[in-house]
Image (tube, rainbow, N blue to C red):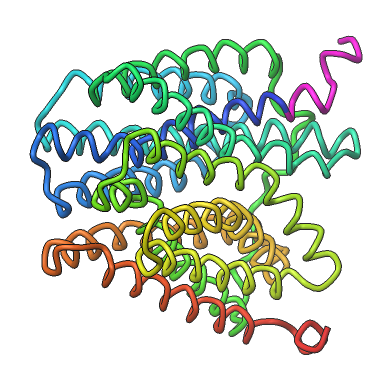
């Protein structure tokens, strides 16, 4: 094996592309395409929330399945197969029109996006650790924002050509397939070495750990309402399709450097402070998206959402691993379950609130309040030295 084949940058770029297509497009392209689906098919907000929740249920199931040891030695094959299915499922969304079909497809898409995330992380992080380049994890996670930005540019192109919502899904599938080819070329081997797979100890009975798990679930509830309905909020305000795409572009662009910046802040203060502050800033953005009139509100909401949600995802997991270092797989699974439950409930509740009120204000303010509570709980979990740091 030559040096180039094991380059940590090569594997980090593979991770970037994989997350761009599996998460940034596979999971989140639903947000900018949703308004067109609602207009074209007459879907209600509760219908849209149900479809979104199906995707999050699939993500939860996929992550928990991937957390087992059944794929050891086959991580690369499973990751590539998941990316292939991700592309096919995206294109399939343009071929159907019934809510039942949408629910099944989005459930499966959520499952394969989680499988991609877990197995690509095992590949990429092992090579980064072997090379002593763990700082490149930020490049890996920037793929989510990159994918969101790419999907928003796609929406701009489709809006200028007056293409309907089905074209968004077809092109998403095509872009995802191209990403699969690049990932297969860059990630040309599985994980470096074979880490121990011995039986882990049980999770500690620690109040701080319970608080982080609860806070992570509340974060899942709080972020997902804006992440699902942000572009629909813009559409309800009577804005153009181009501006809808630009708001989503701002979300993606803000997400790209967010983890690097928040990790830098966490090193200077603490993981707990960084996580709590990111929850507060996200809450401000969620509220701003519906409380500030004109274009400024949704634009601020998109920027603050992008600038925080991926960092919160990583920081929450890091805090949990600090509190349960002897059980990394167990704590990943329970944190994923908590987060997954929150983001499953979020779209269901918000969809019902939107139908009841006729707008997104009450749902968004509820989400903002939940994020503030999540910040308070996380702060209370911090060790004494971190509280005064």
Question: Left or right: where does residue 5 sit relative to residue 166?
Answer: right
Find out whether residue 129 is within the magenta segment.
Answer: no
Question: Left or right: where does residue 163 sit relative to residue 122?
Answer: left
User: Residue at position x 40%, y 61% from top?
Assistant: 289
Q: Quadrant of residue 165?
A: top left
The spot of residue 226 in percent (x, y) is 38, 57
Taking depth in this image into account, of 258 and 176 the one nearest to the observer is 258
Q: Quadrant of the C terminus?
A: bottom right
User: Residue at position x 29%, y 39% from top?
Assistant: 107
Q: Quadrant of residue 355?
A: bottom left
Numbered-mark total: 0
Vertical arrangement, residue 75 with respect to residue 289, above or below: above
User: Residue at position x 15%, y 54% from top?
Assistant: 46
Q: Would you say the magenta stretch is mainly helix, strand or loop? A: helix
Vertical arrangement, residue 194 with respect to residue 275, above or below: above
User: Residue at position x 47%, y 66% from top?
Assistant: 219
The spot of residue 328 in percent (x, y) is 65, 57
Q: Which residues are magenta?
A: 1-12
The spot of residue 347 in percent (x, y) is 28, 57
Vertical arrangement, residue 35 with respect to residue 234, above or below: above
Taking depth in this image into account, of 313 and 208 the one nearest to the observer is 313
Residue most extreme to the front: 294
Q: Quadrant of the N terminus?
A: top right
Taking depth in this image into account, of 152 and 23 the one nearest to the observer is 152
Vertical arrangement, residue 43 with respect to residue 190, above or below: below
The spot of residue 252 in percent (x, y) is 55, 41
């Amino acid at each position: 094996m030559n040096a180039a084949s094991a380059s940590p940058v090569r594997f980090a770029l593979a991770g970037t592309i994989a997350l761009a297509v599996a998460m940034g497009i596979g999971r989140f392209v639903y947000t900018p395409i949703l308004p067109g689906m609602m207009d074209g098919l007459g879907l209600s907000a509760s219908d849209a929330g149900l479809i979104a929740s199906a995707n999050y249920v699939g993500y939860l199931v996929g992550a928990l399945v991937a957390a087992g040891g059944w794929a050891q030695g086959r991580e690369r094959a499973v990751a590539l197969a998941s990316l292939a299915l991700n592309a096919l499922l995206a294109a399939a969304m343009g071929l159907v029109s019934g809510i039942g079909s949408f629910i099944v497809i989005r459930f499966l898409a959520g499952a394969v996006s989680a499988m991609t995330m877990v197995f690509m992380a095992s590949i990429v992080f092992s090579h980064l650790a072997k090379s002593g380049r763990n700082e490149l994890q930020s490049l890996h996670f920037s793929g989510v924002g990159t994918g969101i930005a790419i999907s928003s540019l796609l929406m701009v192109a489709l809006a200028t050509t007056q293409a309907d919502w089905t074209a968004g899904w077809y092109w998403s599938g095509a872009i995802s397939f191209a990403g699969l080819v690049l990932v297969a070329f860059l990630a040309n081997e599985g994980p470096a070495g074979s880490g121990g797979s011995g039986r882990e100890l049980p999770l500690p009975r620690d109040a701080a750990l319970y608080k982080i798990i609860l806070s992570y679930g509340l974060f899942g509830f709080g972020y997902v309402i804006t992440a699902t309905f942000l572009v629909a909020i813009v559409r309800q305000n009577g804005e153009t399709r181009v501006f809808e795409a630009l708001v989503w572009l701002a979300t993606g662009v803000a997400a790209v450097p967010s983890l690097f910046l928040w990790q830098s802040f966490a090193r200077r203060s603490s993981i707990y402070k960084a996580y709590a502050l990111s929850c507060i800033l996200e809450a401000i953005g969620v509220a701003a998206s519906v409380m500030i009139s004109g274009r400024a509100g949704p634009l601020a909401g998109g920027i603050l959402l992008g600038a925080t949600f991926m960092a919160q995802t990583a920081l929450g997991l890091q805090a949990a691993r600090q509190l349960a270092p002897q059980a990394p797989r167990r704590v990943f699974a329970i944190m994923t379950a908590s987060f997954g439950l929150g983001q499953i409930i979020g779209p269901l509740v918000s969809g019902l609130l939107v139908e009841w009120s006729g707008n997104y204000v009450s749902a968004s303010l509820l989400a903002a309040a939940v994020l503030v509570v999540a910040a308070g709980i996380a702060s209370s979990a911090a060790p004494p030295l971190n509280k005064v740091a």
